[in-house]
Amino acid sequence: MASKGDVQVEALMAALDHPLKPEIEALRTTIKSAAPELGERVKWNAPSYYLGPHDMAAFNLRQSSFVQLVLVFPGGLMIEDRRGLLEGDYKDRRLLRFDSMAGVEHKRPALQAVVRQWVALVSALP
């Protein structure tokens, strides 16, 4: 049975009018396959992900030329980004930007690794 969040995200995606909708769907699949334990819900009028009480990531869909994924790190914890995928130098978040399906495909393995690292980091929290 689908959760309330799943139903809301599916309704949002069905109604979404964005030129990079296929890329957004591919990114959703990538995130969910990397960490099936993540919950999905609508936040900031976009798909977002969480584990327990911790927000993991949310899409920023305001631009039409690219899709941004905002990763949230609770308490300032951070993962090591060996592949240089994450952008920004914020205390509690990093950004990922995608502007084509080729970019999504190219960054897929690194994104999956980042998602798994995030889950491991947050799962170790008390």
Image: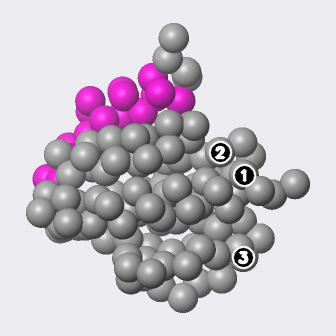
Q: Nearer the viewer, residue 27 or 108?
A: 108
- Few, some or many residues within 10 Å of mark 1 (<14, 14–19, 20+): few
| Residue corresponding to mark 3 | 76
Determine whether the residue tagged by mark 3 lies in a helix, strand or loop: helix
| Residue corresponding to mark 2 | 51
| Residue corresponding to mark 1 | 123
Q: Is residue 18 above or below residue 70?
A: above
Q: Is residue 42 magenta?
A: no
Report the residue that reaches farthest toward the bottom.
89
Q: Is residue 29 above or below residue 123?
A: above
Q: Is residue 65 left or right of residue 44?
A: left
- Few, some or many residues within 10 Å of mark 3 (<14, 14–19, 20+): few
Determine whether the residue tagged by mark 2 lies in a helix, strand or loop: strand
Marks 3 and 1 in Cβ contact (< 8 Å):
no
Determine whether the residue tagged by mark 1 lies in a helix, strand or loop: helix
Marks 2 and 1 in Cβ contact (< 8 Å):
yes
